Amino acid sequence: MTISPWHHHPRIRLTPQKVAKLFLERHGCCRECGRKLGPSDDYIVEHIIALENGGTNDWDNLGITCLWCKPKKDAEDHATAASTRSKATKHFISKSMRQSKWPSRKFSKRETIE
Ligand SMILES: [Zn+2]
C-alpha cells in the first residue's frame, strides 16, 4: 500500500544468513538473466518490484541479481518511477496550473493558504 509515488517502504538490511538463505532458495540464479552464480560471484539482493515503485520488503519480493544485470534493472526501475510521478503530477495538477507559473505567487506563502 503505497500512499503516493513519492513515498515508499524503508530499505532494510538483510543479515548475511538471510542473504545465504535467499541465495539457496533461488538456486543461485540471477532473477534477470538466469545466470547461475558461483560462490565467488558478486550479486545483490534486490526488490523484484522496486521500493520506489511500490514494492515491499516481503520475502517474495526479494530476488538476487548479478552485477551485470543490476545497472539495467536500476535504470528500468528509475524510469518507471519517474513516469509514475510524472503521471500523478499530470493527474492532480490541472493543465492551466501547469501552464501558469506554479506555485503562483498568490499561494506561495503559507499564511495565505491557512
Ligand atoms: Zn543477471
Image (tube, grey):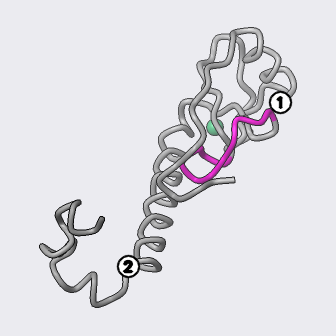
Horizontal side, residue 67 vs residue 103: left or right? right
- Residue 69's quadrant in the figure? top right
Q: Residues within 10 Å of mark 2 (few under 14, many from 20)?
A: few
- Seen at 50% across and 44% down, the residue is 74
- Residue 91 in percent (x, y) is at 47, 79
Q: Which mark is residue 93?
A: 2
- Residue 11's quadrant in the figure? top right
Horizontal side, residue 109 vs residue 22: left or right? left
- Helix, strand or loop at label 1? It is loop
Magenta-drawn segment: 49-59
> In this view of the protein, which residue sits in the foreground, 113 or 51?
113
Instruction: Give, as a three-letter code, the residue at label 2.
Output: Ile
> In this view of the protein, which residue sits in the foreground, 74 or 58?
58
Instruction: Give, as a three-letter code, the residue at label 1.
Output: Arg
- Seen at 47% across and 53% down, the residue is 6
- Seen at 69% across and 9% down, the residue is 16
Could you tell me what secondary structure mostly forms the magenta stretch? loop
Q: Kindly indicate whether the residue at mark 1 contacts the one at mark 2 (C-beta within 8 angstroms).
A: no
- Seen at 84% across and 20% down, the residue is 24
19 magenta-colored: no
Q: Which mark is residue 26?
A: 1
